[in-house]
Image (spheres, helix red, strand yellow):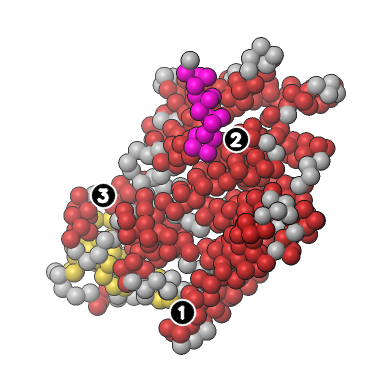
Amino acid sequence: MVQPRLSSVIRKHPQLSLLLLSALLLFADNGNSSLLAHDEGYYAMQARWMLETQDWLTPQWWGTPIYDRTVGIQWLIALTYQIFGINEFSARLPSIISCIISVILTYQIGKILLNRQIAFLAAIILCLMPIWIFEGRSATQNTPLVCVELLGIWALLRGEELGNKQQKQKILWGILAGATFGLGFLIKGFMIILPGVAIIPYLIFRNKQHRYLENLGIYLGLIIGFIPVIIWLTLSCLKYNSFFPVTDLFGKLLYLSADDTYNPGTFYYFWNIPLNTFPWALFSVIGIVCIWFYRNNRISLLLGYPIILFILLCSFRTRTPYYPLQILPFMALFASVALIRFEDIYQLRKKRVNQIISYLLSAFTTLGILLLVLGSLITLNIHLPVISLTPEIQQYGILGIILGASWATINTTWKNRKFLPNKYWLASWVISPYLTITTLGFIGVLGDRNPVFRTELQQPQIHQILAVKPINFVIDNPVNNKSDAEVVNYSEVEISKTFMLLSFYTPQLGKITKIQDLQTNSYAWITPKIPTNTLNKYEIMGTVKGWKLIYKN
């Protein structure tokens, strides 16, 4: 009785079901949270300064204006700070909400482009892509940008559904679609240009159907969407009596387009995307082939948009794991098409194709069994010759059991598909990843990004001082790079990351100063660059990742 009722609820309320399913993945937590320095700590700190100084125009770092990016995500985080206080949950909440909305929008878009069944499964698959959930739980610009892009695509499709009737409503949908371009710029700057270019083939080749090129609403929406950007930049220029906010913004674009610091190679995305979306990227390729042969009438959007966007991302010199987040909703749609159409493909009775399907299913079934056995051995503390069962590894034993459980049944449900409802075959793919990601949340892996930093910061002697005293920062070594053996263990990057996190987690910030300028009865975080043997005049209260909290008598 429970199962038919559950299926009935999903059919009647798919959006609510997706909201609840995705919310569990995104809110699962063990109570211990910590931020990544890059880029979570950066945006979280800029938002904190906006709230504390009430300067909503200036993205800053320790009082220095830095207009190398736009301010949409900082505004959103600062607003959640006002409601829930300054903490990790508030910093990540805009991304979490954007992630949930994006999942629902993926369903809405898939329902229009394909059908309800494919759309619902695609929304579930999107939630099960590791990089999607990781970024959805991060205080960054990435999922809010995807949310705005999907909102624009959905608005375009809703307007097209109206045909040539209800022109007033069509103009309203056009305004919404156009406005998302400016909102996307406010969130992540020039990155919005790439999806803007990728959508052009749909606007041109489907113009007979949607008539958006003649839709006044699109152009009006573009103007409306850029009004907040124009106001922000204008007021910023007036505040500083300079055009440097604009020139710095364009300078960052030129820097990223020419610099190789974040360029891991031309073919980076060809292996990084499959790794970060395992196993769904494989099925996405199969789904693309299916859609191509079935000739969807909106192929310029369904295939053209993500493929063009992928090519543009590959051609941009700066390549990161999170840039492809923009194509993941479409990859989820492709993967859903592949899984739901597996039976149709198999019925073509092409020997080689059926052999490939059999090998594929056997491979995942074998992987499931291996994970199940390995997870059981680790959980039972049975020592293996090639694995040292440390406490860190032992906590992942249960994950192997969970992930392998339903994957181990893939071949069985496939061979018995004529006797079982199709949902059993689909469930064998998604149940284990869903429960695994949920478990990762509840044991703290997804939310506690810096457990060592968090543990060291919670030392009683440090925690008590931070709660009541303003803390200064000494970030430079006054003795010409003099160092001792202890400093060698900390790279410049690691020192910088810890500085960023200490800035966020220090409730009362003092100022950046030189060590010789510290006033009596004051506290300061001291960079690892300064050797311990030069701190004889100060009392060391504790250490966090090489940074020492000192007290000057």
Question: Where residue 184 sits: x, y (%)?
Answer: 57, 62
On screen, 122 above or below 473?
above
Q: Secondary structure at mark 3?
A: loop
Q: Secondary structure at mark 2?
A: helix
Residue at 78% across / 23% down in the picture?
346
Question: Where residue 397 sits: x, y (%)?
Answer: 45, 26
Badge 1 local density, few (<14 within 10 Å), some, or many (20+)? many
Q: Residue furthest bottom?
A: 241
Residue at 55% across / 52% down in the picture?
147
Of mark 2 and mark 3, the one earlier in the sequence is 2
Number of the label disc, if any, that sits on residue 120? 2
Q: Is residue 257 left or right of residue 206?
A: left
Distance between mark 1 and mark 2 Cα atoms? 44 Å
* Residue range of the region highlighted in magenta in the rendering: 2-18
Q: Is residue 316 left or right of residue 535?
A: right
Q: Nearer the viewer, residue 434 or 504?
A: 434
State the residue position of label 1.
236
Residue 47 magenta-drawn?
no
Residue at 41% across / 51% down in the picture?
93
Distance between mark 2 and mark 3 Cα atoms? 43 Å
Q: Nearer the viewer, mark 1 or mark 3?
A: 1
